[in-house]
Image (spheres, rainbow, N blue to C red):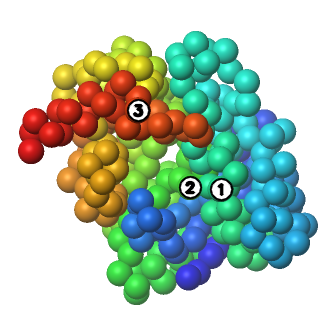
Amino acid sequence: MATETIYHGPNRDGTGSIVIIAHSAGNGKTGDAVSLVIAAVEVFGAVKASDQSTHGRARAYWGAIKENIEAACGKCMFAAWVHKERDALNLKRCYAQHNYQNVGQPAKIIWEAQDTLPEHGVFQLQNWQNILRFASYTGVKTIRSAVVGDLGMVPVDVATAMIDNGCGFDWLGYTHQWFRSEHLKSTHQASTQGPWKAAQNAQDRGWSVYHALPEKDVTVAPSFVLCEAQQGKLAGVRVTCAGCTRKCDGSGNMNYIIDHGAGANLKRAPAGMVALKSLTIAA
């Protein structure tokens, strides 16, 4: 596995400094991929200063994101520790950033990156091409955007350079910044949540959509299909994004997922029970 830091500099809004690290490995759900970690530079520093243990890195990451999560995630309602609208919609916090077990992955990737950061504010094209070339040698063909963070919070010129120099790789991408990120439309899904009208809004603006549905919502909007990995989970079958027939790559698919944040119980959720029944009928 290879790890490269490809950017260190201000985020899109100039409200914080971020680091983008590319790592040539995926996980059990996504399958093999070049995985991006977008994190505040303070988070990078905290992990680097931690001990070498898995728990030590995770604790350092967990502690640092509490004050620095907006630099990489913006004002995403899933990212915030307290968010009245999210709570009113019966949605849970981010499954990636607010799950202690899951933050071990980005913490490990940060730990494996070089200790010295590259020149501030300069996209490291050579590092990006190196990681993609190495990944291609091992049969990897997908870029995952992102393990944590949002490419929509990266300066537009940097994100565009990453896409333009993607070496023919496919993308597995989501952005909560879709409302101001036309440059990501061909590679990312618009991440929406809550009422279906939020998904419809993005769809009306030409976006492919990945919608997070509250556990208690048993309705499904026309043209939307439950994430195939979650279908597999309901059916007790392991499904990865690598074999998905409805890719989250900006190609026009309208997918949804039942809220799977910390504390979610898919099979007991009303939305999950309805989805499972529909899968049984279809079979």
**10 Å crowding of disc 1: few (<14), some (14-19), many (20+):** few
**10 Å crowding of disc 3: few (<14), some (14-19), many (20+):** few
Residue tagged 3: 268
Real-space Cα separation, disc 2 to disc 1, in angstroms:
13 Å
For residue 105, what is the image quadrant? Answer: bottom right
Pointer 2 or 3: first along the chain: 2
Amino acid marked by disc 1? Gln
For residue 139, what is the image quadrant? Answer: bottom left
Q: Is residue 37 above or below residue 190?
A: below
- Image check: 107 left or right of 224? right
User: Mark 3 and mark 1 in contact (Cβ < 8 Å)?
Assistant: no
In depth, the one of 269 and 164 nearer the eye is 269
- Image check: 19 left or right of 155? right
Pointer 2 or 1: first along the chain: 1
Real-space Cα separation, disc 2 to disc 3, in angstroms:
27 Å
| Nearer to us: label 2 or label 1 | 1
Amino acid marked by disc 2? Val
Amino acid marked by disc 3? Arg
- Image check: 248 left or right of 135? left
Q: Quick one: which residue is furthest to the front in this view?
A: 268
Say the numbered circle drawn on residue 131: none
User: Mark 3 and mark 2 in contact (Cβ < 8 Å)?
Assistant: no
For residue 13, what is the image quadrant? Answer: top right
- Element marked by disc 2: strand
Residue tagged 2: 147
Q: Quadrant of the N terminus?
A: bottom right
Pointer 1 or 3: first along the chain: 1
Q: Is residue 46 visible?
A: yes
Q: Is residue 156 above or below residue 112?
A: above
Residue tagged 1: 101
